Image (spheres, helix red, strand yellow):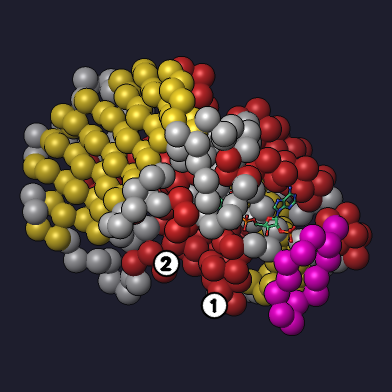
Amino acid sequence: MTRKIALAGIGKIAHDQHVPSIAASPDWELAATVSRHGRVDGVEAFTDLDTFLAARPDVEVVSLCMPPVPRFDYAAAALQAGRHVMLEKPPGATLSECQQLEAMARAAGVSIYATWHSREAAQVEAARAWLADKHLRSLKVVWKEDVRRWHPGQEWIWQAGGVGVFDPGINALSIVTRILPDPIRLTAATLEFPENCETPIAASLAFAHPHGADISAAFDWRQEGDQTWTIEAETNGGYMLLSEGGAKLAIDGDVQAAPAGDDALQGEYPRLYARMAALVHAGGIDMDLSPLAHVADAFLLGRRLTAAPFNW
Ligand code: NAP
């Protein structure tokens, strides 16, 4: 069955991933866009959500791709109009607004999905399966990339609520919270804020693990040249390296074959849309906020350092 969906917040990620994933999916028809400036060729375009909701009661689902701070008002209005809602990561600017959205969805009897695209990277499930019966000794996350390359000119990432380097860092945390069999909790953090920005450009985090494993994460947006998105685990049963943002897995140095039929990172968004179709079909809700909780904890507990000013 094909359902009608609207995309709201037509910018970089909508064009890069959402539009092609919907176009390639048997589950969805892109029936409308809602965006103040952006649009998609051949698709009815609205600049205002309320006008869209009144004009298109036939569109059951709204997928929200704008930055996190403005997203709550769009999500709340769509849920209150009885539409199912899909949220880009991070699902909101605060934990309490995400909890409110989940409550609204339950009250309205509709689906809501806090998506974590990195969890859909090709080898994340294989890493989870491999770790499931191991005794973890240490886990080290290194997520270092060049903000100028991945967020050209985006001012919102430097404004309060834009989360700075946690915008990519939360992708790593979404994988960690998926692959580890045990819950972890943040115990210390250091956040580096450029003196002209409201959000951090780098962060280092330490976590407590219930069986004493040493868990750390280093995020940095100042890395030029090669980009690093790795998660390394030492266990009683060997060494695991999950690299390329979850697309590549090596166990004791042996690179594991990709799952059959997978086209590595290109599969992340198609899998999110397939999951949304299944949730809507089943009347389900998926609002795992654990990656956002770790980020919130880092802002609560973190020691703040001032870094050199950031200029594009
Ligand atoms: P973006 O291009 O800067 O923003 C997307 C669109 O949101 C903008 O083009 C704008 O469209 C709309 N928007 C911006 N500010 C708004 C506001 N105050 N109120 C209403 N609409 C607003 O950002 P993006 O890179 O697509 O990222 C959007 C979300 O996707 C973020 O949560 C990000 O973490 C996530 N994401 C991004 C990437 C990536 O590679 N960029 C990857 C994965 C996930 P209009 O001006 O037309 O309204």
| Residue 47 magenta-highlighted | yes
Q: Nearer the viewer, residue 166 or 61?
A: 166
Is residue 108 toward the left or the right of residue 308 in the image? right
Residue 185 seen in this snapshot: no
Residue at 12 percent across and 43 percent down: it is 239
Where does the image place residue 185, in percent across and percent down from the top left?
38, 23
| Three-letter code, disc 2 | Gly
Q: Is residue 96 magenta?
A: no
| Image height of 102 relative to 18, above or below | above
Residue 48's x, y, as percent? 85, 58
Q: Which residue extends farthest bottom?
A: 42
Amino acid type at circle 1 is Ala
Query: Dot 2: what SS?
Result: helix
In this orientation, which residue lies closer to the viewer: 147 or 84? 147
Q: Which residues are magenta?
A: 36-48
Is 2 located above or below residue 124 in the figure? below
Which residue is labeled 1 in the image?
24
Please identify the dominant SS of the magenta region: loop
Residue 204, placed above or below residue 47: above
Q: Tell me which residue sits at (26%, 44%) in the image.
A: 231
Element under label 1?
Answer: loop
How packed mark 2 is, by other alpha carbons closer than 10 Å (few <14, some 14-19, many 20 or more), is: some
Residue highlighted by disc 2 = 267
